[in-house]
Amino acid sequence: MRRKDREIIEKKQIEEFIAKEQIIRVGFYDEGDVYIVPVNYGYIYNNSKYTFFFHGAKAGRKYELTKSEPKVGFEIDGKYELTGGDVACEYSCKFQSIIGTGKLTLIEDKSEKVIGLNAIMRQTTGRSNWDYDDSMLEVVAVFKLEVEKLSCKGK
């Protein structure tokens, strides 16, 4: 990180930020193109490692890229606040962001899908104990992003 004065390394501060935000952007490499998709997420923090979950259809570009190119980048940002000035160059902003890389896989096991879906629901609703129809679990794709590298920055 170029601006070490903006690096956030305190685990509690990083955890609080991830717990508050709602959208993760996942970046795929697609045969010379970059494809970035914003999705709602849930996560589990265990043994000092983050695992993010999101869901979608069992079809489409995101689904196919997960099967063929599982190495991805990701980004979460928030806490944005514009700070003003008397001239244009005095304007700036406060923010916090996380970037990282990881391996993305599709979850096939129903019990593991439930874990991922409950993590997503906890993130979006605050409640993590849900029931899912077998028919629903059969048709939904649940994506699991195991973080390999992560850095956090704020101003």
Image: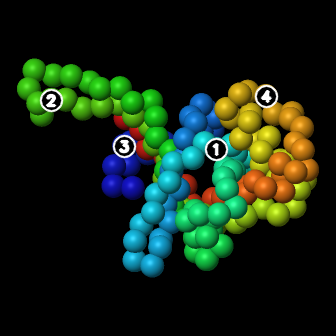
Q: Sequence order check: which comes first, mark 2 or mark 4?
A: 2
Q: Which mark is residue 90?
A: 2
Residue at numbered disc 4: 127
Q: Residues within 10 Å of mark 4 (few under 14, many from 20)?
A: few
Observer-side mark, 3 or 4, equals: 4
Q: Is residue 16 above or below residue 74?
A: above
Looking at the image, which residue is at 26% across and 24% down? 83
Q: Amino acid at mark 1?
A: Tyr
Give the Cα separation between the discs numbered 3 and 4.
36 Å
For the residues labelled 2 and 4, the Cα–Cα distance comes to 43 Å
Q: Residue at x 68, y 51 (%)?
A: 55
Q: Which residue is mark 1?
A: 41
Q: How far, Cα to Cα, is label 1 from label 4?
A: 14 Å
Q: For the residues labelled 1 and 3, say whether their Cβ atoms are less than 8 Å apart.
A: no
Residue 57 locus on image (x, y percent): 67, 56
Numbered mark located on residue 5 in the image? 3
Q: What residue appears at the point 50 percent right and 66 percent down from the top-left corner? A: 28
Does any portion of residue 51 appear in the rendered image? no
| Mark nearer the N terminus (1 vs 2) | 1
Tell me whether circle 1 and circle 2 mark residues in contact (CB < 8 Å). no
State the image coordinates of residue 137 (x, y, percent, origin top left).
Answer: 84, 52
Q: What's the amino acid at mark 4?
A: Arg
